[in-house]
Image (cartoon, helix red, strand yellow):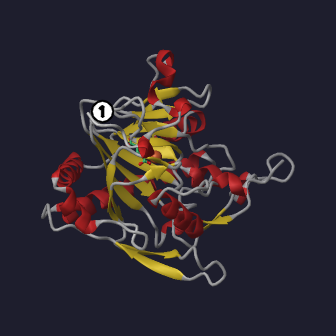
Amino acid sequence: MGDIDPAFIQSTEHRANNHKNAVEAVEIPVIDMFGSREELISRIGKACEEWGFFQVTNHGVSSEVSSRAEAVAKKFFEQSTEEKRKVKRDEVNAMGYHDGEHTKNVRDWKEVFDYLVQNSAQVPLIESHEKQELRTITNQWPQHPHDFREALQDYAREVEKLAFKLLELISLSLGLAADKFHGCFKDQLSMVRLNHYPPCPFPDLALGVGRHKDAGALTVLGQDDVGGLQVKRKSDGEWIPVTPTPGAFIINVGDIVQVWSNDKYESVEHRVVVNRERERFSIPFFFFPSHKVMVKPVEELVNEEENPAKYREYNWGHFYAHRNRSDFKKLHVDNIQISHFRILD
Ligand SMILES: O=C(O)CCC(=O)C(=O)O
Ligand SMILES: [Fe+2]
């Protein structure tokens, strides 16, 4: 066994073995979407408030579509690095294969393939602040496996429907109209990521994904039966593992819902631990609005005396462009955060 590349090493307080005694048999809520609508809205609202995370069953995404997506993801990652790098992402095109992602400037023990739900999309160029220049990012599809593109586009279409359904339920749980946010997703930047975490000889030093919060509105995550995702419990900061539930999706609130709800629903930190024995696959769908969207607390939810807006508005495209740049390589500055837009009380 060789030495670990120092780029992967987490600082002591962030390593996986740090909270060994703390994990009792606690689970994030599992919500059956077949239930009555009233009950569903109330359970989702409660889960968003208490955990920022929950699992859903009976969600309407066909298991056949999910299995095909999982199968082509596995086949893609089994190929040689040389083959995979034919669709490598770079600083210009953020979509495609990537094996050097950094979270908070430490390298993640994983390889990924990213694609946009709407084959191409426009995002601002961060270098040109004043002019608001845009560039187009476009999917790159590998030649092998031959059914890769079709299986993954079918998957994105189905999961997108679920994401809209969940966003409606979340809006209703906040007392807003079901379609309150629909307009924001015209020309959406939503993307799907295929994650592959190979077995890791140093699971105590590295993480599959370092602790982070998701920047979008919602994440809808499919995972296999290996396990590794951990959620930071709001009440005491303990890392709670998310036990794989066959056929379920894991849903988490992202930064945008936190800002829209003026902190009623918080975007919660999570991370992925790796293990020596088994590779793991997961497929998050990141529900991202259009680059044009200005994100700010919803007017109906704020009021000057009792609950003033906690954030200044920010542009989603600008935020997205900054995040993509810092994911791509190690930078010596912290990446952009919603806390930078917080109005201090
Ligand atoms: O693989 C997982 O379970 C979660 C991955 C994740 O948090 C992410 O890609 O943002
Ligand atoms: Fe995440």
Residue 257: x and y, percent?
58, 52
Between 33 and 331, the one nearer to me in the picture: 331
Q: Secondary structure at mark 1?
A: loop
Name the kind of residue labelled 1 in the image.
Pro
Q: Is residue 271 left or right of residue 4?
A: right
76 vs 107: above or below? below
Residue 258: x and y, percent?
62, 49
> To which residue does mark 1 refer?
201
Tell me which corner region of the image, top left, top right, bottom left or bottom right, holds residue 272. top left
Residue 340: x and y, percent?
70, 56
Which residue lies most toward the right here? 305
Q: Is residue 44 left or right of residue 207?
A: right
Q: Is residue 323 left or right of residue 65?
A: right
Could you classify mark 1 by the number of other residues whose Cα lies within 10 Å: few (under 14), some (14-19), or many (20 or more)?
A: some
Q: Residue at x 59, y 69 (%)?
A: 318
Q: How many marks?
A: 1
Which residue lies most toward the front here? 3
Task: Answer whether residue 28 is visible to the viewer in this image.
Answer: no
22 vs 32: above or below? above
Q: Residue at x 47, y 42 (%)?
A: 210
Is ligand 1 less than 8 Å from the beta carbon at label 1? no
Which residue lies most toward the left here? 146
Q: Residue at x 38, y 68 (%)?
A: 90
Residue 267: x and y, percent?
57, 44
Q: Residue at x 74, y 60 (%)?
A: 312
Task: Answer whether residue 167 is visible to the viewer in this image.
Answer: yes
Between 163 and 316, the one nearer to me in the picture: 316
Q: Is residue 262 left or right of residue 71?
A: right
